[in-house]
Amino acid sequence: QVQLVESGGGLVQAGGSLRLSCAASGNIFSVNAMAWYRQAPGKQRELVASTSSRGSTNYADSMKGRFTISMDNAKKTVYLQMNSLKTEDTAVYYCNADVVRFGGLGAYEYWGQGTQVTVSS
């Protein structure tokens, strides 16, 4: 089994910053990529940012310049530094990982349980 555990969510005022972390553990041979998604009430889940194990990153347009994703391959941990937060960034943020398991064939996708980020005006 593979587990993703997120931390770092909370309440922050608009213009403030938060740093999310997500650690992968369990039966992991390698992590190909990790990403952050978010889902606001009444909206579909959307990609925030992704990174490959080689450091190739991708951001949703509305997050460019404000959010930074990074990954520590040795710790199997992905981070999301969020600056200049806006009220519309309020959502549950989910960690996602593309993982190759020991003895497995191919890669599998896993999700964390989510962490709430609330930005107040």
Image (spheres, rainbow, N blue to C red):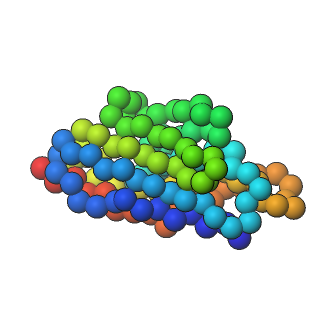
Which residue appears at 26% of the width and 46% of the height? 17
Given residues 21 and 34, the one toward you in this image is: 21
Q: Quadrant of the N terminus?
A: bottom right
Query: Residue lying furthest bottom in this view?
Result: 1
Visible residue check, residue 82: yes
Which residue appears at 57% of the width and 46% of the height? 72
Establish if 118 lies above or below 55: below
Query: Residue 104: percent from the left, percent from the top?
Result: 84, 59
Query: Residue lying furthest left in this view?
Result: 121
Query: Residue 62: percent from the left, percent from the top?
Result: 35, 33
Which residue appears at 35% of the width and 29% of the height? 65
Establish if 94 lies above or below 2: above
Visible residue check, residue 44: no
Left or right, residue 50 beside residue 42? right
Given residues 28 and 98, the one toward you in this image is: 28
Query: Residue 44: percent from the left, percent from the top?
Result: 43, 52
Left or right, residue 14 beside residue 25? left
Establish if 97 lies above or below 7: above
Establish if 33 lies above or below 104: above
Given residues 27 and 109, the one toward you in this image is: 27
Which residue appears at 61% of the width and 53% of the height? 76
